[in-house]
């Protein structure tokens, strides 16, 4: 090779690739680049030397550490000391309220844990007072609560006295005389005094070489007088050199401040204005009777006016601060009319009472005083007055009772609420005593009800009426009456006579109907399905499955979102209720008619839930009519505009058709013109070709004539000669 540089033999490249590699190197390496290459090589070499030196130092250090580690493993410590000691404290609270003055759930807590190398290692926990409210005499006590390690056996807690220690935990330790002095030595210079020698605890290991931990409570003693404020204590946690009977010298002392805060009573806070009552959060709820658990909604209360010590109603008033904390407030309850108000225990009664309840919860009772009528009860606090609540005190006997048939058709068996009765006393007050229903005659009793033993009715405060049960016995119609006593002989009031029919028939046929013939657009309507028995009479309440082969079909959709859940199962109602859109003997669906005028038809086909005679097609129709002149005019204008638009569309379509025909004719004319032009061009070409041929023939003829003339001339010349 004719290279400008040479390779030593030991790195020279041999083989078939030699030439290619050499050429590559020849192109990559220039003579003027050799100094740079040399510099890079020297720099790399120096870095390697440096790294080698650092590596040697690291290796040496690791060797020293390993040697030291092995040395430590081979040499036992001269003395064990508690290590990794951690102390966690949390403040506590208390209250001035009796019976809730020393509770572990609100105590200050101290948790100590660490690694105890030897069983003779010692940690002590004690405390001293640091500060307290002026004039306070309450005494705090430190209590051992529990071990905080997974195994309780690893932690021993000793409670020493001045002479002998008492073990708390896995074992007891005796002969600890003098420990108190040793435990407290070294850091008793803090403000306050030691709260008793029995509030010093020693924490030890059960065997050494294990984690030891204990939790303590710091509480105010319940038997000592307390005042509001903050009580602060300094907890002393000390570690000691290992010892046998007594610990050695103190190694370390940690101090940790904890506080127990006693708030003023809620009553004092409210009365002094320290915390304002939020009237928007105050509640006053009246419940019937004297329940132990009160609901959050007022009850309707109607009771007999006979004077007694019975609590007919309970009113609970609760008051809160803006932070939703219960706080007492002065509450006054005043009764106008019959009845009296009493304290919760009934010890004080009158027409008006004012009480400041404990903890913002005040309870009052309402009792009868022998006067009939409606009592008006006003609850008023310092910051809010509630709307009057009422209690109806009715006379013992009713004056009049009015009965109505609620279920016109009943089944054989019990029928609750088949008859409804309302009653009033002599003063016109709603009489809510126990009413009874009975069959008017023995013959009626053979069909429904009882003539000899009246059945008790149930009073419904929501309806303000008595719901009376009737038991159906046989097919037919029975007459019934309602009285105000359990027997006819004792009754002072008897209602009018009402009747109900007992049905024993089966569901046979069905009828579809609307509740009206015509409706306004969007008007609420009822779609009704009536079921009749084999005699064509209404059936009692029942559920019929597979009444139709499919859900009821509608010819014109009802208003959006108002389509009911039509189905094939029918639920026949026993009573009629306008408020609930129910009709006795029917399944009723609520719909809203279409917004546009026209006829709406519903249809269905009876199925196996009905007798064979009822498995036929059914239908019913109603008409939507717009009776509002303005809306009718607008709708008429809209329809006229729609018709005009339709006519315009028709005209436009006709014009389009004509234009299409004209375009087709124009296309045909264009084609014809193009064909004529082609024919003319062809004719012109033929004429031109013919003219050319004629010219050629004429030229040839002229030449022949010339030739002939010349020939004749020659002949003539010869003849003249």
Image (tube, rainbow, N blue to C red):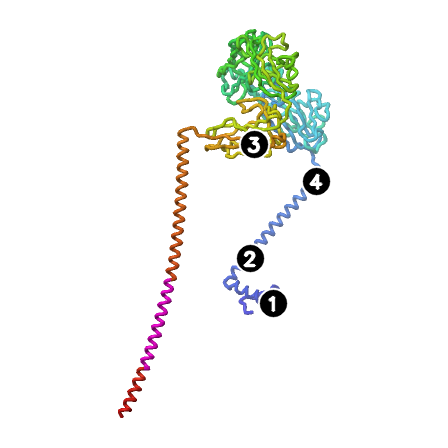
Q: Is residue 441 visible?
A: yes
Magenta residue check for 689: yes
Observer-nearest of 671 and 213: 671
Which quarter of the rendered picture does the N terminus lie within?
bottom right
**x and y percentages locating residue 668 in the rendered image:** 39, 57
Query: Where 247 falls versus 48 (above or below)?
Result: above
Between disc 4 and disc 3, whose residue precedes? 4
Q: Which mark is residue 618?
A: 3
Observer-nearest of 297 and 547: 547
Magenta residue check for 635: no
Between disc 2 and disc 3, whose residue precedes? 2
List the residue tagged with mark 1.
16
Q: Are marks 2 and 4 in contact (CB under 8 Å)?
A: no
List the residue tagged with mark 4.
73
List the residue tagged with mark 2.
42
Query: Where does the magenta region start and end?
Result: 676-704
Q: Residue at x 41, y 41 (%)?
A: 646
Between disc 1 and disc 4, whose residue precedes? 1
Look at the numbered disc 2 and give the secondary structure of its residue.
helix
**x and y percentages locating residue 381 in the rendered image:** 50, 15
Look at the numbered disc 4 and give the secondary structure of its residue.
helix
Q: CA distance from mark 1 to mark 4?
A: 64 Å
């Amino acid at each position: 090779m004719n290279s400008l540089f040479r390779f030593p033999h030991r790195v020279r490249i041999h083989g078939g690739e030699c030439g290619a590699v050499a050429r590559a190197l020849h192109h990559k390496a220039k003579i003027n680049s050799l100094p740079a290459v040399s510099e890079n090589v020297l720099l790399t070499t120096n870095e390697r030397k440096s790294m080698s030196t650092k590596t040697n130092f690291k290796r040496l250090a690791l060797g020293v550490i390993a040697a030291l580690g092995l040395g430590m493993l081979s040499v036992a410590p001269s003395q064990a000391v508690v290590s990794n000691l951690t102390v966690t404290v949390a403040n506590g609270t208390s209250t001035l309220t009796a019976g809730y003055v020393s509770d572990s759930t609100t105590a200050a807590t101290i948790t100590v844990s660490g690694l105890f190398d030897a069983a003779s290692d010692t940690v002590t926990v004690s405390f001293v007072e640091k500060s307290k409210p002026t004039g306070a005499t309450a005494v705090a006590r430190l209590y051992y609560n529990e071990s905080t390690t997974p195994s309780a056996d690893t932690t021993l807690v000793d409670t020493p006295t001045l002479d002998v220690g008492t073990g708390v935990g896995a074992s007891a330790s005796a002969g600890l005389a003098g420990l108190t002095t040793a435990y407290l030595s070294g850091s008793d210079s803090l403000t306050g005094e030691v709260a008793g020698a029995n509030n010093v605890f020693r924490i030890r290991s059960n065997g050494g070489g294990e984690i030891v931990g204990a939790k303590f409570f710091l509480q105010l003693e319940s038997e000592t007088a307390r005042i509001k404020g903050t009580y602060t204590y300094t907890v002393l946690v000390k570690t000691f050199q290992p010892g046998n009977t007594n610990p050695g010298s103190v190694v370390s002392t940690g101090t940790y401040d904890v506080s127990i805060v006693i708030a003023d009573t809620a009553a004092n806070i409210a009365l002094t204005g320290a915390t304002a009552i939020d009237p928007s959060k105050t509640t006053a709820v009246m419940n019937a009777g004297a329940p132990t658990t009160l609901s959050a909604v007022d009850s309707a209360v109607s009771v007999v006016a006979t004077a007694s010590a019975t609590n007919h109603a309970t009113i609970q008033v609760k008051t809160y601060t803006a932070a939703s904390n219960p706080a007492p407030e002065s509450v006054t309850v005043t009764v106008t009319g019959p009845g009296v108000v009493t304290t919760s225990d009934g010890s004080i009664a009158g027409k008006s009472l004012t009480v400041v309840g404990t903890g913002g919860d005040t309870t009052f009772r309402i009792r009868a005083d022998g006067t009939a009528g409606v009592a008006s009860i006003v609850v008023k606090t310092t910051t809010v007055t509630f709307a009057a609540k009422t209690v109806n005190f009715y006379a013992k006997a009713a004056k009049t009772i009015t009965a109505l048939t609620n279920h016109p058709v009943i089944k054989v068996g019990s029928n609750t609420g088949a008859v409804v009765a309302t009653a009033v006393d002599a003063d016109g007050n709603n009489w809510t005593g126990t009413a009874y229903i009975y069959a008017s005659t023995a013959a009626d009793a053979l069909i429904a009800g009882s003539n000899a033993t009246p059945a008790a009715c149930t009073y419904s405060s929501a309806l303000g009426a008595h719901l009376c049960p009737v038991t159906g016995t046989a097919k037919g119609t029975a007459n019934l009456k309602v009285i105000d006593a359990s027997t006819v002989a004792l009754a002072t009031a008897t209602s009018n006579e009402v009747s109900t029919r007992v049905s024993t028939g089966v569901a046979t046929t069905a009828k579809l109907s609307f509740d009206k013939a015509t409706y306004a657009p969007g008007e609420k309507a009822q779609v009704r399905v009536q079921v009749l028995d084999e005699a064509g009479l209404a059936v009692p309440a029942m559920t019929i499955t597979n009444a139709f082969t499919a859900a009821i079909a509608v010819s014109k959709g009802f208003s959006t979102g108002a389509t009911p859940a039509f189905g094939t199962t029918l639920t026949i109602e026993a009573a009629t209720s306008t408020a609930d859109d129910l009709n006795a003997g029917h399944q009723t669906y609520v719909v809203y008619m279409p917004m546009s005028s026209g006829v709406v038809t519903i249809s269905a086909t009876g199925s196996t839930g009905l007798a064979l005679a009822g498995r036929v097609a059914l239908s019913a129709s109603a008409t939507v009519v717009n009776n509002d002149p303005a809306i009718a005019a607008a709708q008429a204008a809209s329809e006229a505009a729609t018709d005009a638009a339709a006519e315009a569309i028709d005209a436009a379509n006709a014009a389009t058709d004509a234009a299409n025909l004209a375009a087709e004719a124009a296309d045909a004319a264009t084609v014809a013109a193009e064909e004529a032009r082609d024919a003319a061009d062809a004719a012109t070409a033929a004429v031109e070709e013919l003219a050319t041929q004629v010219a050629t023939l004429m030229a040839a003829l002229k030449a022949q004539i010339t030739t002939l003339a010349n020939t004749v001339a020659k002949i003539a010349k010869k003849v003249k000669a």
